Image (cartoon, rainbow, N blue to C red):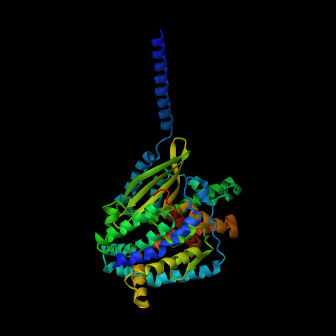
Amino acid sequence: MILRKSCQTFSRYVFVLVLVFCHGISWGQEVDYLDDESYEPSSVSDPLEPVNRFFFNVNDKVYVWVLEPVSTGYSKVLPSDIRQCVSNFFYNLGEPVRAVNCLLQGRVHDAGRTLGRFVINSICGVFGLADPAAHEFKMSPVYASLGETFSVWGVGDGFYLVVPLLGPSTLRDLTGTVGDGFAMTTHTPWNDDVLTTAAAHGVRSVNYTSLHLGEYEDAKSLSFDPYIAFRNGYFQIRAKQFDHTHQ
Amino acid sequence: MYISRIKLFIFTVCFLFIAGIFGIQTAASATPDPTEQFRPFIAKVTATLADPDLKTLSKREKSRRVISVVRERFDFREMSKRVIGQYWRDLSPSEQDEFESLFTQLLQYVYVDGIDDYSGQEVEFTQQRIKGQRAEVQTLLVDKQKTIPVAYIMTLRGNEWMAYDVIVEGVSLVRNYMEQFREILRKDGYSGLTDQLRKKIVELEQENKVS
C-alpha cells in the first residue's frame, strides 16, 4: 500500500525533472575546514531578528516546560531500542520524498540508494522499524530535502526565520519543509483528520527529543547568546547536509 | 662498447628512478602522520576520563587534570586567535594572553561537561586529510545509543600536529563562538567580552558545583 502510494508521489513529480534539465544546477558548496573561507561569517540576513528572538524564547519555553518533561517521562517508559525503532519508522516514511528530491537535484545515484533503502527497510526491516539497509547492505542514509532542491536550482535563502514549534529555518527552507510535508501526506498512514496528523507529529517530536535529552540544555548553558549560537549551528549543520562531496 | 653504453644508460635510469622514489619517500616522511600522532593522545584522554580517581576529585580539579592532558595536542593560542578574528591584531600582548587564558578556562568547562557523561565510549578513527600545513582527522565517538562524528582540525607546528578546532556533528566550535563573540565585540568591545567570559566561567563553575 505504502509502496503504491509512493509510486504515485513519484510520478507526480517526474514532470518537474524537465525543469532541472532546463535550469543550471548549482551544487552545494563543499565545507572544507582546512580552508580559511569556511571560517567566514554566514551571509544569510536576519532582518526579523526581534521577532525571531521572541519566537526563539517561546520555543525555548515550550521545550523546557512541555517537550523535555514529556520526553523524559516517555524515555523512562520505553527502552532506547524501541525508541530508536520508532525513529527509524518515521525516517523510513520520508525516504520516497527524499528520493524525489535527489532526482530533482540530478543526484540519480542517491535517488536509487534512497529508494533501495526504502524497499529493503520496509520489507526486511518490518515497515522501517529496523535499518537493515544501513547495517547489512552498507547503504547509509542520504540527506535530501525540498529546501536543498530549491538551493540547487539557484533559489536564495531569503532570510533567517525562527518558526514557532519548528525552530530555526529560512524563508526558502520553510517553504521546502511545507512542500515536503505535503508530499509526505500522499503516503503517510495518518492523514484522516487533523488530530491524528498532529498526534503523529507530536509522537515524532517527543520520540526525537527522548533520544537527545540534555543536548539542548548543554548547548544553551555553554553559549553566551543562545539565539546566535543556534542560528550559527543551524547554518553549519545545513552546510554539512548540503555537501555531498565526501559521501 | 655499444652494449656497455646501453648498460650504463639503463643503470643511470634505474639509479635515478630509485633515487626519485627514495626522495619522494623522504619528502613524505617529513610530514608526520596526524592520525598516528592523535591516536595515542585520544587514548590518553579517554584513559584519564575513565580513571576512577577522577570521580573523587572536585569539579575544578577534574577539569584542570583533563585540560592538562588536552593541552598536549591543542593549540589554545591559535584557537583564541581564530575565535576573536580580526580583533586579535588590535589587542596588546597582555590582552592577548588574558583572552587566551579566559578562553581556555571556558573550554575547560566545555570539557568538564563531558566528563560526567563519559561512560567508556570508544573513539574510532575513520579518515584523515592533509592540505599543506593543515590536517583534518575524522573520528566517531561510538556510544551505546548513537554514534557522534567528531573531527579535529590541526596545524603543523614543527613536527607536531596541534588541533585548533573541533567539529562535532558538523558544527565547528571555533566558528560558533566566533559568531557570538563578534556580536559582543561589536556592541560592548573587548572589555565587554572579557566581562562576559568571566561571568560565564563563574556561572559554569557554580553550575557544576551544584550538580
Residue B119, picture quadrant:
bottom left
Residue A63 place in picture, x, y as percent: 48, 81
Toward the viewer: B150 or B52? B150
Residue A158, picture quadrant:
bottom right
Residue B51 in sight: yes
Left/right placement of residue B76 relative to residue A187 reads: right
Toward the viewer: A111 or B23? A111
Q: Quadrant of the C terminus of chain A?
A: bottom left
Residue B38 place in picture, x, y as percent: 44, 49
Q: Quadrant of the N terminus of chain A?
A: bottom left
Q: Is A4 situated above or below B132?
A: below
Residue B200 in sight: no
Toward the viewer: B131 or B39? B131
Residue occupying the far right of the picture: B90
Residue A111 place in picture, x, y as percent: 43, 65
Left/right placement of residue A37 relative to residue B34 reads: right
Q: Is A103 situated above or below B72?
A: below
| Residue in the image at 47% along x and 37% along y | B29
Q: How many marks?
A: 0
Residue B45 place in picture, x, y as percent: 41, 54
Toward the viewer: A126 or A237? A126
Residue occupying the far top of the picture: B1
| Residue in the image at 62% along x and 82% along y | A51
